[in-house]
Image (spheres, helix red, strand yellow):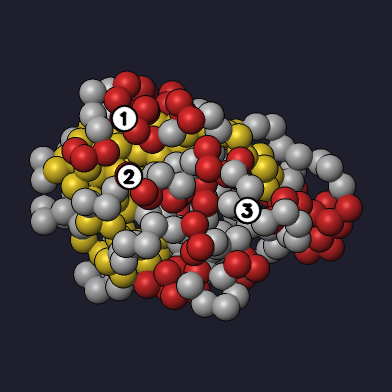
Amino acid sequence: MKIHALQTGTVRTKQVQLTGGSLIARLYQVIFTQKWSDWLPTYCWLIEHPEGLLLVDTGETAAIYQEGYLPKGGLYHKVVQTRIQPEEEIPHQLAKIGFSPKDIKKVLLTHLHGDHIGGLAHFEHAEIMVGRTEYEFATSKKGPGAGYFPKNWPQWFQPILVDYTDGAEENFSTSKKVADNGSVVIVPTPGHSTGHQSVILKTGEKTIVVAGDLTFNVDTLEKEIPDVVLWNKESQQTVEAMRQYVKKTKAVYLSSHDWNAIDYLEKVKI
Protein backbone atom coordinates (compact mmCIF):
# COMPACT_ATOMS: atom_id res chain seq x y z
CA MET A 1 0.00 0.00 0.00
CA LYS A 2 1.28 3.46 -0.94
CA ILE A 3 -0.16 6.92 -0.26
CA HIS A 4 0.32 10.15 -2.21
CA ALA A 5 -0.46 13.71 -1.06
CA LEU A 6 -2.08 15.65 -3.92
CA GLN A 7 -2.29 19.41 -3.49
CA THR A 8 -5.27 21.18 -5.05
CA GLY A 9 -4.76 24.86 -4.32
CA THR A 10 -4.49 26.65 -0.98
CA VAL A 11 -6.79 27.89 1.76
CA ARG A 12 -6.67 30.17 4.76
CA THR A 13 -8.91 30.73 7.76
CA LYS A 14 -9.11 33.15 10.62
CA GLN A 15 -6.00 32.83 12.78
CA VAL A 16 -7.91 31.81 15.90
CA GLN A 17 -8.82 28.49 14.31
CA LEU A 18 -5.15 27.48 14.56
CA THR A 19 -4.26 29.13 17.85
CA GLY A 20 -7.43 28.42 19.82
CA GLY A 21 -9.32 30.84 21.98
CA SER A 22 -12.52 31.45 23.89
CA LEU A 23 -15.92 31.63 22.25
CA ILE A 24 -15.92 35.42 22.59
CA ALA A 25 -12.43 35.72 21.09
CA ARG A 26 -13.44 33.50 18.19
CA LEU A 27 -16.61 35.46 17.49
CA TYR A 28 -14.76 38.77 17.62
CA GLN A 29 -12.03 37.67 15.24
CA VAL A 30 -14.42 36.03 12.79
CA ILE A 31 -16.70 39.05 12.55
CA PHE A 32 -14.53 42.10 13.16
CA THR A 33 -10.89 41.39 12.21
CA GLN A 34 -8.78 40.43 9.23
CA LYS A 35 -6.38 38.23 11.20
CA TRP A 36 -5.95 35.46 8.67
CA SER A 37 -3.72 32.42 8.90
CA ASP A 38 -0.96 31.86 6.37
CA TRP A 39 -2.02 30.21 3.13
CA LEU A 40 -2.15 26.46 3.69
CA PRO A 41 -2.28 23.53 1.26
CA THR A 42 -5.48 21.75 0.34
CA TYR A 43 -4.53 18.08 0.13
CA CYS A 44 -6.43 15.03 -0.97
CA TRP A 45 -4.87 11.58 -0.78
CA LEU A 46 -4.41 8.79 -3.30
CA ILE A 47 -4.00 5.31 -1.82
CA GLU A 48 -2.59 2.55 -3.95
CA HIS A 49 -4.25 -0.47 -2.37
CA PRO A 50 -4.32 -4.13 -3.47
CA GLU A 51 -8.12 -3.94 -3.73
CA GLY A 52 -7.97 -0.91 -6.03
CA LEU A 53 -7.13 2.80 -6.00
CA LEU A 54 -8.75 4.80 -3.22
CA LEU A 55 -9.02 8.59 -3.09
CA VAL A 56 -9.65 10.43 0.17
CA ASP A 57 -11.43 13.69 -0.75
CA THR A 58 -11.32 15.30 -4.19
CA GLY A 59 -9.88 18.74 -3.46
CA GLU A 60 -10.93 22.19 -4.55
CA THR A 61 -12.15 23.33 -7.97
CA ALA A 62 -11.45 26.46 -10.02
CA ALA A 63 -15.22 26.79 -10.42
CA ILE A 64 -15.09 28.85 -7.20
CA TYR A 65 -14.34 31.85 -9.44
CA GLN A 66 -17.53 31.44 -11.45
CA GLU A 67 -20.36 33.86 -10.74
CA GLY A 68 -22.82 32.38 -8.25
CA TYR A 69 -20.76 29.31 -7.32
CA LEU A 70 -20.01 30.66 -3.84
CA PRO A 71 -22.20 33.05 -1.83
CA LYS A 72 -21.26 36.70 -2.09
CA GLY A 73 -21.80 37.62 1.54
CA GLY A 74 -22.72 36.12 4.86
CA LEU A 75 -20.50 34.10 7.17
CA TYR A 76 -18.69 32.06 4.52
CA HIS A 77 -16.21 34.69 3.34
CA LYS A 78 -15.57 35.82 6.91
CA VAL A 79 -14.08 32.46 7.90
CA VAL A 80 -12.45 30.94 4.82
CA GLN A 81 -10.71 31.97 1.59
CA THR A 82 -9.55 29.57 -1.12
CA ARG A 83 -7.28 29.80 -4.17
CA ILE A 84 -6.79 27.37 -7.03
CA GLN A 85 -5.91 27.41 -10.72
CA PRO A 86 -7.41 24.96 -13.25
CA GLU A 87 -4.08 23.18 -13.64
CA GLU A 88 -4.08 22.45 -9.89
CA GLU A 89 -7.32 20.46 -9.94
CA ILE A 90 -7.39 16.75 -9.14
CA PRO A 91 -7.18 15.35 -12.72
CA HIS A 92 -3.89 17.19 -13.27
CA GLN A 93 -2.51 16.09 -9.90
CA LEU A 94 -3.35 12.46 -10.62
CA ALA A 95 -1.75 12.73 -14.07
CA LYS A 96 1.55 13.83 -12.49
CA ILE A 97 1.88 10.40 -10.89
CA GLY A 98 0.55 8.41 -13.84
CA PHE A 99 -3.15 8.05 -13.03
CA SER A 100 -6.49 9.46 -14.16
CA PRO A 101 -9.85 9.87 -12.40
CA LYS A 102 -11.15 6.77 -14.24
CA ASP A 103 -8.58 4.67 -12.38
CA ILE A 104 -10.14 5.42 -8.99
CA LYS A 105 -12.29 2.64 -7.54
CA LYS A 106 -13.53 4.33 -4.35
CA VAL A 107 -13.71 7.89 -3.08
CA LEU A 108 -13.84 8.32 0.69
CA LEU A 109 -15.04 11.77 1.72
CA THR A 110 -14.05 13.11 5.14
CA HIS A 111 -16.84 15.69 4.87
CA LEU A 112 -18.75 17.75 2.34
CA HIS A 113 -17.18 21.22 2.50
CA GLY A 114 -16.27 22.61 -0.90
CA ASP A 115 -12.49 22.32 -0.68
CA HIS A 116 -12.88 18.58 -0.06
CA ILE A 117 -15.46 17.76 -2.75
CA GLY A 118 -14.70 20.29 -5.47
CA GLY A 119 -13.46 17.55 -7.80
CA LEU A 120 -16.50 15.29 -7.45
CA ALA A 121 -17.60 15.79 -11.05
CA HIS A 122 -14.70 13.61 -12.25
CA PHE A 123 -15.77 10.51 -10.29
CA GLU A 124 -19.23 9.50 -11.44
CA HIS A 125 -17.91 6.00 -12.13
CA ALA A 126 -16.51 5.48 -8.61
CA GLU A 127 -18.05 4.20 -5.39
CA ILE A 128 -18.31 7.27 -3.17
CA MET A 129 -18.68 7.02 0.61
CA VAL A 130 -19.64 9.76 3.08
CA GLY A 131 -21.01 9.72 6.62
CA ARG A 132 -24.79 9.46 6.82
CA THR A 133 -25.03 12.25 9.40
CA GLU A 134 -22.86 14.51 7.24
CA TYR A 135 -24.93 13.96 4.11
CA GLU A 136 -28.27 14.39 5.84
CA PHE A 137 -27.21 17.63 7.51
CA ALA A 138 -25.62 19.02 4.35
CA THR A 139 -28.82 18.43 2.38
CA SER A 140 -31.08 19.87 5.11
CA LYS A 141 -32.35 23.45 5.27
CA LYS A 142 -29.49 24.28 7.63
CA GLY A 143 -26.84 23.11 5.16
CA PRO A 144 -26.12 26.32 3.21
CA GLY A 145 -25.74 28.32 6.42
CA ALA A 146 -23.11 25.88 7.62
CA GLY A 147 -20.94 26.01 4.49
CA TYR A 148 -22.56 23.28 2.38
CA PHE A 149 -23.68 24.06 -1.15
CA PRO A 150 -25.56 21.08 -2.66
CA LYS A 151 -26.49 23.25 -5.64
CA ASN A 152 -22.88 22.78 -6.80
CA TRP A 153 -22.91 18.99 -6.51
CA PRO A 154 -23.21 16.82 -9.64
CA GLN A 155 -26.82 15.79 -10.30
CA TRP A 156 -25.82 12.13 -10.24
CA PHE A 157 -24.29 12.38 -6.75
CA GLN A 158 -25.90 9.66 -4.62
CA PRO A 159 -23.13 8.48 -2.28
CA ILE A 160 -23.04 5.38 -0.14
CA LEU A 161 -23.95 6.61 3.34
CA VAL A 162 -21.65 5.26 6.01
CA ASP A 163 -23.01 3.79 9.21
CA TYR A 164 -20.28 2.69 11.58
CA THR A 165 -21.29 -0.94 12.16
CA ASP A 166 -17.97 -2.78 12.38
CA GLY A 167 -17.14 -2.42 16.05
CA ALA A 168 -14.41 -0.58 17.90
CA GLU A 169 -11.12 0.66 16.48
CA GLU A 170 -8.94 0.99 19.59
CA ASN A 171 -10.52 3.82 21.63
CA PHE A 172 -13.02 4.71 18.89
CA SER A 173 -16.15 2.78 19.84
CA THR A 174 -17.43 2.39 16.26
CA SER A 175 -15.90 2.06 12.81
CA LYS A 176 -16.54 1.03 9.21
CA LYS A 177 -14.27 -1.39 7.39
CA VAL A 178 -13.54 -0.32 3.79
CA ALA A 179 -10.99 -2.96 2.77
CA ASP A 180 -11.85 -6.64 3.19
CA ASN A 181 -8.59 -7.30 5.04
CA GLY A 182 -9.19 -4.50 7.54
CA SER A 183 -6.31 -2.37 6.28
CA VAL A 184 -8.59 0.63 5.56
CA VAL A 185 -11.06 1.70 8.23
CA ILE A 186 -13.28 4.77 8.66
CA VAL A 187 -13.99 6.20 12.10
CA PRO A 188 -16.44 8.99 13.01
CA THR A 189 -14.63 12.19 14.05
CA PRO A 190 -17.37 14.83 14.40
CA GLY A 191 -16.56 18.39 15.38
CA HIS A 192 -15.26 20.31 12.38
CA SER A 193 -18.52 19.25 10.83
CA THR A 194 -21.38 17.29 12.31
CA GLY A 195 -20.62 14.12 10.35
CA HIS A 196 -16.88 14.46 9.78
CA GLN A 197 -14.98 11.17 9.49
CA SER A 198 -11.33 10.13 9.28
CA VAL A 199 -9.64 7.30 7.40
CA ILE A 200 -7.18 4.93 9.08
CA LEU A 201 -4.69 2.93 7.03
CA LYS A 202 -2.81 -0.07 8.38
CA THR A 203 0.18 -1.42 6.54
CA GLY A 204 2.53 -3.80 8.27
CA GLU A 205 3.58 -2.22 11.54
CA LYS A 206 2.61 1.28 10.43
CA THR A 207 -0.66 3.12 10.99
CA ILE A 208 -1.60 6.29 9.10
CA VAL A 209 -4.51 8.56 10.00
CA VAL A 210 -5.91 10.67 7.16
CA ALA A 211 -7.69 13.12 9.43
CA GLY A 212 -9.32 15.58 7.05
CA ASP A 213 -10.07 18.80 8.96
CA LEU A 214 -10.09 17.34 12.46
CA THR A 215 -7.15 19.63 13.37
CA PHE A 216 -4.90 21.75 11.18
CA ASN A 217 -1.71 19.86 11.96
CA VAL A 218 0.13 17.62 14.43
CA ASP A 219 0.90 20.53 16.74
CA THR A 220 -2.74 21.52 17.12
CA LEU A 221 -3.64 17.86 17.67
CA GLU A 222 -1.13 17.65 20.53
CA LYS A 223 -2.48 20.90 21.97
CA GLU A 224 -6.04 19.60 21.43
CA ILE A 225 -7.11 22.59 19.33
CA PRO A 226 -9.87 21.40 16.97
CA ASP A 227 -10.34 22.93 13.53
CA VAL A 228 -13.62 24.71 14.23
CA VAL A 229 -14.93 28.23 13.74
CA LEU A 230 -16.69 28.20 17.11
CA TRP A 231 -15.71 25.86 19.94
CA ASN A 232 -18.05 22.93 20.56
CA LYS A 233 -17.90 20.08 23.07
CA GLU A 234 -18.11 17.38 20.40
CA SER A 235 -15.01 18.66 18.62
CA GLN A 236 -13.03 18.70 21.85
CA GLN A 237 -14.00 15.12 22.70
CA THR A 238 -13.06 13.95 19.21
CA VAL A 239 -9.65 15.63 19.26
CA GLU A 240 -8.91 14.14 22.68
CA ALA A 241 -9.84 10.68 21.36
CA MET A 242 -7.66 11.08 18.27
CA ARG A 243 -4.68 12.32 20.25
CA GLN A 244 -4.94 9.21 22.44
CA TYR A 245 -5.28 6.99 19.36
CA VAL A 246 -2.20 8.48 17.65
CA LYS A 247 -0.16 8.17 20.83
CA LYS A 248 -1.20 4.56 21.45
CA THR A 249 -0.71 3.33 17.88
CA LYS A 250 2.24 5.64 17.06
CA ALA A 251 0.33 6.61 13.94
CA VAL A 252 1.43 9.06 11.27
CA TYR A 253 -1.12 11.89 11.41
CA LEU A 254 -2.00 13.61 8.12
CA SER A 255 -4.13 16.74 8.04
CA SER A 256 -5.61 18.15 4.85
CA HIS A 257 -4.00 21.56 5.46
CA ASP A 258 -0.59 20.77 6.93
CA TRP A 259 2.49 21.79 4.93
CA ASN A 260 4.50 19.15 6.83
CA ALA A 261 2.36 16.22 5.67
CA ILE A 262 4.63 15.31 2.77
CA ASP A 263 7.65 15.25 5.08
CA TYR A 264 5.80 12.90 7.43
CA LEU A 265 5.09 10.54 4.53
CA GLU A 266 8.68 10.58 3.35
CA LYS A 267 10.02 9.75 6.81
CA VAL A 268 7.92 6.59 7.06
CA LYS A 269 8.41 5.75 3.35
CA ILE A 270 4.70 5.24 2.69
Marks 2/1: CA distance?
12 Å
Distance from Cα at disc 3 to Cα at disc 2: 21 Å
Upstream in sequence: badge 2 or badge 1: 1
Callout 3–callout 1 Cβ contact below 8 Å: no
155 relative to 194 in the view: left or right: left
Name the amino acid type tagged 3. Gly
Q: Nearer the viewer, residue 23 or 143?
A: 143
Separation of marks 3 and 1 at Cα, in angstroms: 28 Å
Which quadrant of the figure contains the N terminus? Answer: top left
Identify residue for label 2.
122
Q: Secondary structure at mark 2?
A: helix
SS at mark 3? loop
Can you give x and y, in whole percent of width and height, for residue 239 in the image?
53, 57
| Residue at 39% in and 31% down | 6
Say which amino acid is labelled 2: His
Q: Residues within 10 Å of mark 1 (few under 14, many from 20)?
A: some
Instruction: Identify residue for label 1.
Output: 94
Local crowd size for mark 3, using a 10 Å CA cut-off: few (<14), some (14–19), many (≥20): few
In this view, the mark in front (2 or 1):
2
- Please tell me which residue lies in front, 231 or 44: 44
The first of marks 3 and 2 along the sequence is 3
Direction from residue 136 to residue 26 in the image, left or right: right
In the image: residue 161, left or right of residue 125: right
Instruction: Bin the neighbour count of mark 2 within 10 Å (Cα to Cα): few under 14, some 14-19, many 20 and up.
Output: some
Q: Earlier in the sequence, mark 3 or mark 1?
A: 3
Secondary element at tag 1 = helix
